[in-house]
Amino acid sequence: MKLLHFLMLALLTCVVPAAVAAPPATGRAAEISDGVVAVGTLRLQAHRLAKLRVQRGLGLAPATTERDERQAIDAAEAALARLGRLARQAAVQRSLLRCIALWRELRAAAGNPPAAAGTERIAQLAEEIGLQSGRLALQLEGETESPVGRLLDQSSRLNMLSQRLARLYLQALAGDRSAGRLVDLEQTRREFVAGLLELESAPDNSRATREALALARNQWVFFDAALDRLQQQRSDPRAPLNVATTSERIREVLEVVTTQYAEQFAARGRLDASPEPRNGSDGRTGRPSVAK
């Protein structure tokens, strides 16, 4: 067990810059919330890097693509730094250790020149990180029965699906229209639609969350239209860049949604941890309750 702890800390030291510090914990609910968000960020940025690698191969907005790649790497490593506090929890050690190892390999592959084999390997690593981080998120989410915990994980997963969908679309547009690729594309599309509908219909949504989800829905309309045009013989030459741009806009909006769910989750945890009302108070103002 001591050897596993040492290996975990060594891997975290290699992956994460020392300058990145984890935010202070403000209770178990906040810790779980931050962990789920960090896991979702790692999953999202891994798939985002896979998408950006295809963009680079297609020569789409090279300067912007290079900037976004650096941003994705920084965001993923910051997420791993925040996950460092979970390193001593035996229940999540195996999944976390696997995520770290996969991320190290993905980051190394992303530093190589674009090539068909390299692009496919990065996509495979992103898929593996998605599976391992999904298990890790479920392990964390399992510590609470709050419905907001489910929405928190679902919003980050939906964001990952938007990046995966963009990557599959760009690969198909570049000429890889194998049966397997098109099946993955359609399946991911259905999962995104179902996930977005689940979030939109959640009774725990705040007004701000509903507004952010409405923005995501508006962006999805443009994205979905581009997917429909993929089967046409004459596709719009602007479609690849439009999909790349729209996927980034969806990412930005869904990151706002995830942050809002995280705040709700942590706030609900603080309320659940508050002492029971005393002396017949109503639990809201602390004043004695009045019979009605």
Image (cartoon, rainbow, N blue to C red):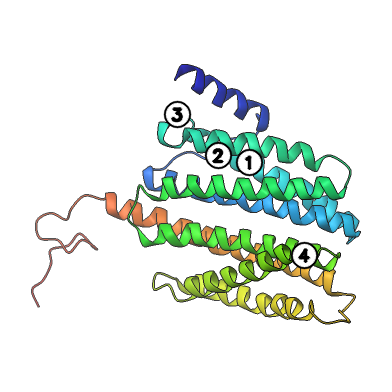
Q: Which residue is mark 1?
A: 78
- Which of label 4 and label 2 is nearer to you? 4
Please tell me which of labels 4 and 2 falls first in the chain.
Answer: 2
Q: Are marks 4 and 2 in contact (CB under 8 Å)?
A: no
What percent of the width, then of the height, locates residue 134?
52, 50
Amino acid bearing label 1: Ala
| Label 2 with label 1: CB-CB less than 8 Å | yes
Q: Amino acid at mark 2?
A: Arg
Looking at the picture, how far across and down is residue 107, in whole percent?
Answer: 74, 39
Residue assigned mark 2: 82
Q: What residue is at 62 percent from the left and 66 percent from the top?
A: 188
Mark linked to residue 178: 4
Q: Is residue 127 above or below residue 202?
A: above
In the image: residue 113, left or right of residue 251: right
Task: State the CA–CA distance, disc 2 to disc 1.
Answer: 6 Å
Q: Alpha carbon of mark 4 to alpha carbon of mark 3: how far?
A: 44 Å
